[in-house]
Image: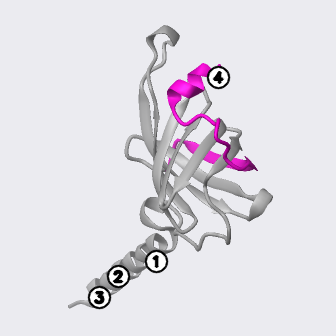
Amino acid sequence: MKAKTIGLLLVLVAVAGTMMMTVACQGFGGVPGAEPMPEGSSFSGLWHSEQFDHMYLHQDGDQVKGVYMYGGGGSIEGEVDGNLLLFSWHEPGDRQRARQDMSGKGYLQLEGQGDDQRLVGEWGYNEDRRGAGPWEAEFIREREDDDPTSLEEVEQRR
């Protein structure tokens, strides 16, 4: 092989190695890797998000389900790995309000402990977990029995 060809191959191997390290450090698709869940923490509770208003989440084992109040309301459903929640979201369409049915994916990473917890992540459309905007929330309080668990209950609170 010529020296020029060998040099090009070495550059390609270096670039591929750098890309693999980036994916390993950030997780698949640019999503951060999971870290251990802070002691005594969970995704359950009432959270306030600048982007999506109040969010009522319930964690059962490694499953999380919930609703948020933004717009006509939406639902979240996902799986927890350490302090990382990978979820799908859905906002149903409403002809009377001229709202289109929308869905996508996202991730939220829990940071902090106790009353100083926050969620930091992103959301995307369809199969993308990123790209549409940030999704952040501050912990407000523990979940209560009369908190909404469905979009129908969200609509009743309006």
Q: Image point 40% across, 82% down: which residue? A: 14
Type of amino acid at the residue the image marks with label 2: Val
Query: Of marks 2 and 3, which one's residue comes earlier in the chain?
Result: 3
Query: Of marks 4 and 3, which one's residue comes earlier in the chain?
Result: 3
Please name the residue that numbered disc 1 is placed on: 21
Element class at badge 3: helix
Q: Image point 45% across, 74% down: which residue? A: 24
Q: Residue furthest left?
A: 1
Type of amino acid at the residue the image marks with label 4: Arg
Image-based side of 51 in relation to 151, left or right: right
- x, y (%) of residue 142? 71, 50
Query: Of marks 3 and 1, which one's residue comes earlier in the chain?
Result: 3
Please name the residue that numbered disc 4 is placed on: 157
Q: CA distance from mark 4 to mark 3?
A: 67 Å
Q: Image point 64% across, 55% down: which residue? A: 120
Q: Quadrant of the C terminus?
A: top right
Please name the residue that numbered disc 3 is placed on: 6
- x, y (%) of residue 98? 48, 12
Do the numbered discs 3 and 1 sit on residues whose CB atoms are within 8 Å?
Answer: no
Q: Which mark is residue 13?
A: 2
Give the extent of the magenta segment. 130-158
Decide which of 129, 62 is in the foreground and name it: 62
Decide which of 108, 69 is in the foreground and name it: 69
Do the numbered discs 2 and 4 sit on residues whose CB atoms are within 8 Å?
Answer: no
Q: Nearer the viewer, mark 3 or mark 1?
A: 1
Type of amino acid at the residue the image marks with label 3: Ile
Q: CA distance from mark 2 to mark 4?
A: 57 Å
Number of other residues with Cα within 10 Å of mark 4, as a class: few under 14, some 14 to 19, many 20 or more: few
Q: CA distance from mark 1 to mark 2?
A: 12 Å
Asked if residue 155 lies in the magenta stretch, the reply is yes
Asked if residue 114 lies in the magenta stretch, the reply is no
